[in-house]
Structures are given as structure tokens and as C-alpha cells.
Amino acid sequence: MDKHDETYEILMVKALDGMLLPEEEEVWEAHLARCPECRQEFESFARTRDVMDEFRVRMLSEREQRLQSKPMPTSNRLAVVLVVLGVLLMWGFSAWHVMVAPEVPWPLRLGHGLVLLGMTVGLLVVSRDRWRTLKTDPYAEVDR
Ligand SMILES: [Zn+2]
């Protein structure tokens, strides 16, 4: 390619993207016909592009299948909600009890506070990550 000016490199890139104007296509085809170097390079790029396209399509369809595969059934949701409510009630009550009861020694009080703080931070982080994953779909712009 080094004996060419960059016109042909630009034409090759456009050809690979299918963006050649009709008059450019004429120039490009004429050049390909008499330049085995460019022909070879172009075919090699086109093969790579085809492999990448195939790979992309396969990844997307696998992803789609994963997304469509069985949403959580209502009974499971109910179980999760019940467990979360129960845990929150127990935490809340024992936290209140530990903080208020005068006979509880301070290390237990402090430990309890730290565990609650850790659980709250963990819950917030998980919810935030989950929210981000739901909101940002990196393939939303890709034509399927
Ligand atoms: Zn050439």
C-alpha cells in the first residue's frame, strides 16, 4: 500500500463500510482490477469484518435468549418480599431494643450499629448497581 497515495486507503475503508459513492465505486473497482496488493488486503479485511459480524450477531442472540429466559415467578418474588420484610422487622426491632435498653453493654450496642450500617450500605450499593445495569444497555443502539 505504501506506493499508493492515501486516496485508495480511504476508498478501501469506505468500501468495507459499504459507504462508497457510485463514482468512487467505479474508481475503486478499477483500481482493484489492476492492483493485486489492494485486492488481497481488501479481501482479508472483508473476511475479518464478516467474522466479526457473525460473532456480534451470535453474541446478541445469545444475550437476547438469556434475557427472555424465564422471568422470576410470582411465588419467588413473594418469598423474597416476605424474607426482606421479616429481616427488616427483626433488624429494626433489635436495633431499637439494643439502643434503648439500659442493660445492654456498649460493645454490643456498637457492634449492632456497625452491622446495621454495613447492611444498609451493602443494600444501597447493590440497588444502585442493579439500577445502572437496567438503565444502560450497551447494545441498545445496535441494529439487529
Ligand atoms: Zn492498490
Image (cartoon, grey):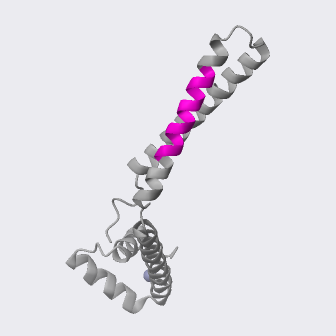
Rendered-image quarter of ligand 1: bottom left
- Looking at the image, residue 114 sits to the left or right of residue 73; the answer is right
In the image, is residue 137 above or below residue 48? above
- Looking at the image, residue 28 sits to the left or right of residue 36; the answer is left
* Number of marks: 0
For image coordinates 54% across by 33% down, the residue present is: 88
Residue 69 percent across, percent down from the top left: 43, 70
Residue 65 percent across, percent down from the top left: 43, 73
Residue ranking furthest to the left: 22
- Closer to the camera in the image, 86 or 49: 86
In the image, is residue 95 above or below residue 53? above
Residue 18 percent across, percent down from the top left: 31, 76
Q: Which residues are magenta?
A: 81-95
For image coordinates 76% across by 12% down, the residue present is: 106
Which secondary structure class fits the magenta region best? helix
Q: Is residue 88 magenta?
A: yes
Residue 38 percent across, percent down from the top left: 46, 83
Residue ranking furthest to the top: 102
| Rendered-image quadrant of the C terminus | bottom left
Q: Is residue 21 magenta?
A: no
The quarter of the picture where residue 19 lies is: bottom left
- Closer to the camera in the image, 11 or 94: 94
For image coordinates 74% across by 22% down, the residue present is: 111
For image coordinates 67% across by 17% down, the residue present is: 98
